[in-house]
Image (spheres, grey):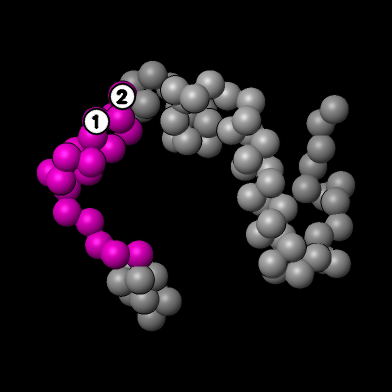
Amino acid sequence: MQFSVDDFDFASLTAAERLLLAQELLDSVFDEVSPSTSAREVAAPFNSEQMAEIRRRAGDADAGRIVGEPWETVRGRLLNR
């Protein structure tokens, strides 16, 4: 069965309830995939070349070869635009 977001009325849910629903949906997806499947592979259907690039970049980040910024810094910059 295929659903559309228009099939559901989320207006009656609080923000906290929508977050809980989103977490439940994500958990249900991860329960169905193999433990070796990364969140990136589940979240976006990239082709093999794109996945190789994502894995390379993730490896660089994990190894400390890429310097990132804390989420709070990025968020503040975006909100001040």
Residue under label 2, please give it. 52
Q: Quadrant of the N terminus?
A: top right
User: What stretch of residues is rendered in magenta?
Assistant: 52-71
At mark 2, the secondary structure is helix
Where is residue 55? Give x, y as percent: 30, 30
At mark 1, the secondary structure is helix
Determine the residue positioned at 17% across, 54% down: 67
> Mark 2 and mark 1: span between their CA atoms?
6 Å
Above or below residue 8? Residue 3 is above
Give the residue at the far left of this rendering.
Answer: 65
Residue under label 1, please give it. 56
Where is residue 71? Give x, y as percent: 35, 64
Q: Quadrant of the C terminus?
A: bottom left
Determine the residue positioned at 79% across, 42% down: 4
Where is residue 31? Give x, y as percent: 62, 30
Question: Along the line of sight, which residue is nearer the eye, 24 or 48?
Answer: 24
Determine the residue positioned at 80% across, 65% down: 13
Determine the residue positioned at 36% across, 27% down: 50
Question: Along the line of sight, which residue is nearer the eye, 78 or 38?
Answer: 38
- Amino acid type, label 2: Ala
How would you rate the neighbour count of disc 1 (Cα within 10 Å): few for under 14, some for 14-19, many for 20 or more? few
